[in-house]
Image: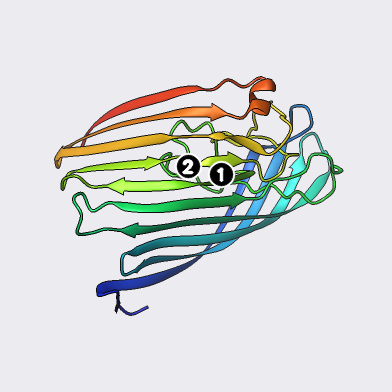
Amino acid sequence: MPEFRFLDKKSQIFADAFYLGFIVDDSSLAAAHGNTTGSTHRDTPGTRIWGNAGPIEFSVGGMWQGGTFKQANNGPSRGVNAWSVNAQVSWRFSRWWGKPSFGVQFDDVSGGDYRTSSTSTWGGFLSPYSPSASYLDLSTYFNMQNVISAGPLVTLTPTSNTSLQLKSPVMWRNSAYDGIYPQSTVAFPYRPHGHYTGTLPQASFNWRPTRHVSFSLEGEYVFLGRNVRHSGAAQGAYVQSNLELTF
């Protein structure tokens, strides 16, 4: 859209449309016990609307996913009918120190149902990309598969070369009859009861003192739900620092 003004601020809204098609030879679906291995191809059209209207910054996207999953060792095939919705909305206070923004992030990614037959349609979305770890989970223990998440999002730019992000997504499984997925295609072996997974308070600090040097420090604590812990998982802290030299 052409530029416009809203609440006396320059504004612009953009729209993207895309298609992602991919084949994964070593794929798996969560089963009641363990995982069902095989190969899959996915067709994923989607769209994203993003930009700002005055101090309101937003990004809203959606994808539908079709395709097939072929079980290993000449096993049966099943169709795929899955989807993903992602949204971030923030209000930026550009006249305050650090130009902070306060908002919310919401994600809803469909899951499957391992109680159904091996030839029925599978509803689990397979992430066609490896999103930035800072988008959902710094530890990468949780991926954008079979998940509903919602939580506050705060960003701050104290100086021209530093930034700070704070967030605390609360996570549930979209389907209680699908697994919990890390950032790979193989689900964890845990099959807890209920939908609630956990809460992930996290912070990420970035500093770029020169054009050739950047430093980041990030941390997170994984508070798991009681049912997830009782199924064998353990909660804990994650801290990572990075020093990057660019030439």
Residue at point 18% right, 50% down? Answer: 97
Q: Which quadrant of the figure contains the N terminus?
A: bottom left
**Residue 12, percent across and down?**
33, 72
Q: Which colour scheme is used?
A: rainbow
Q: Which residue is drawn at 79% across and 51% down?
A: 121
Front in this rendered view, residue 212 or 109: 109
Decide if residue 83 is on the left or right side of residue 117. Answer: left
Q: Quadrant of the C terminus?
A: top left
- The answer for how far apart the CA atoms under marks 1 and 2 are is 8 Å
Query: Who's the residue at 25% across and 75% down the image?
Result: 8
Q: Is mark 2 on a helix, strand or loop?
A: loop
> Would residue 115 be found to the left or right of residue 157 on screen?
right
Please determine whether, in this image, residue 207 is positioned above or below residue 65: above
Report the residue marked by disc 1.
Answer: 144
Q: Is residue 104 shown left or right of residue 108?
A: left
Tell me the crowding category of disc 1: few under 14, some 14 to 19, or many 20 or more residues within 10 angstroms, Cα based: many
Specify the amino acid type for callout 2: Leu
Of marks 1 and 2, which one's residue comes earlier in the chain? Answer: 2
Please say whether residue 120 is visible from this viewpoint: yes
Q: Is residue 135 above or below residue 45?
A: above
Residue 209 versus residue 152: which sits nearer the camera?
A: 152
Helix, strand or loop at label 1? It is loop
Q: Are marks 1 and 2 in contact (CB under 8 Å)?
A: yes
- The residue indicated by pointer 2 is 136
Q: Where is residue 92 in the image (x, y as percent from the top left)?
A: 30, 58
